[in-house]
Amino acid sequence: MTDRYEPFREVARQASLDALAIVPGANFARLFGQEFHQNERPLVVVIPVSGTPAAIVPNLELASFESIGFEGEVFDWRDQTGYQAAFDQLMQSLPVNVLGVEGQVMRVFVDQAFRKAVPAIAIQDAQKQIAALRLHKSEEEIMALRKAIGITQKALANTIDVVKVGMTERAIENILVQHLFAEGAQDFAFTPIVAAAQNSAQPHAHSREDYEIKAGDSLLIDFGARAGGVCADMTRTFFVSHCSDERADVYNTVLAANEAGHLASMPGATAHDVDDATTCVLEASAYADRIRHKTGHGLGRDIHEDPYIMRGNHQVLEPGMVYTIEPGLYELSDMGVRIEDDVLITDTGSESLTQFDKTLTVVG
């Protein structure tokens, strides 16, 4: 029988760790095929370099935890007595002096519970090594991504059909959300961004309740469905009623950069190569001073994960990796344009999982 913990054990071996601690999140969900939420009650699985793993589980979660088919000993605890005794018992059962943790996910009070159980323990951040286990998407994850992206694209198509001058950003967002769930989204990948005019120049803008879109405005929509445990992430920028020649030129510059990123995406290239190809198009334009961010980020169970598509990251791209290509230009006093696709590296090149039209489009 395959040891599903072996990739984690190998991470521990390579980093000279005695064990890894995994908490609910993307790595936990991929390992066990089920999601648990982080809350005030710690739930932790400890995977030693060799031997049987062990877990700390709130008593009220025992029935749910049993469904993952956990092979090791479970130390449960109740609200009335607290969790420290469970940490003490687990650490007595496993010889762990050096523990690797998910530095971006592990919370301080869990770290403190481990240290109280074993005062001499060394706790090291193994986030990057653990997350690297998710770099290559499985066939099931790729299928789930296709589904989540399909939901996202249908929701956007249905939304822009009803956009009209005078609607607020928040009203458009509400329509988008309704379509997202009507098409089968389980959740948001992240809070949708619907931003017009100057607000679209804020890469992570919040929708406004009091701004009514006007003729000539840019309208940037960045959002994604979460389905099958994975996230879609797509951005399209539209223009309301009409588009000036200058704004069209900005848009087409971003589109050319997006297409350059696609052309550079292939096995054997690096994340640096893709960002460089994309950003060079923006830098060679009349709008170079409007560049505000890197080209993209990995995509999967987390909305942002490795590989990060940026200059200086020489990570080689390999089949099964998925990331965004999302160049943008932002004039803070005027407007922003971003065009974002989700890209899969294949054996022979790359595939754009997003197929939503990128031709300059006027709505309303």
Image: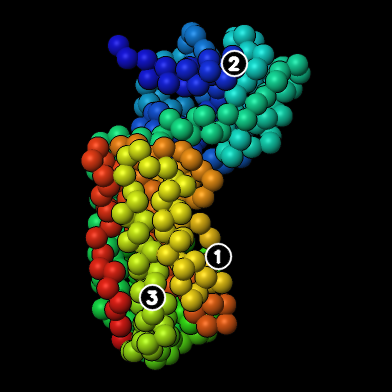
- Residue 16: numbered disc: 2
Q: Which residue is mark 1?
A: 292
Q: Residue 255, how many percent across, how many down?
A: 35, 68
Give the residue displayed 49% in from the left and 66% down from the top. 283
Q: Secondary structure at mark 3?
A: helix
Q: Is residue 180 left or right of residue 202?
A: left
Quick one: 213 or 324, which is closer to the camera? 324
Q: Quadrant of the C terminus?
A: bottom left
**Do labels 1 and 2 touch, CB within 8 Å?**
no
Q: CA distance from mark 1 to mark 2?
A: 39 Å
Question: Mark 2 near mark 3, Cβ–Cβ under 8 Å?
Answer: no
| Residue that mark 3 sits on | 251
**Distance between the Cα atoms at labels 3 and 1?**
15 Å
What residue occupies the far front of the structure in this picture? 284
Kindly indicate the quadrant of the structure image that contains residue 250. Answer: bottom left
Q: Is residue 343 left or right of residue 55?
A: left
Considering only vertical position in the picture, is 207 above or below 110? Answer: below
Residue at position x 51%, y 43% from top?
313
Q: Earlier in the sequence, mark 1 or mark 2?
A: 2
Which kind of residue does numbered mark 1 sit on? Answer: Arg
Q: Position of residue 300 (x, y in %)?
A: 39, 44
Q: Is residue 44 above or below residue 90?
A: below
Q: Nearer the viewer, mark 1 or mark 2?
A: 1
Residue 126: % across, % down: 58, 29
Looking at the picture, does residue 319 appear above or below residue 294?
Answer: above
Q: Nearer the viewer, residue 61 or 154?
A: 154
Q: Amino acid at mark 3?
A: Tyr
Q: Secondary structure at mark 1?
A: loop
Residue 228 visible from this viewpoint: no
Q: Amino acid at mark 2?
A: Ser
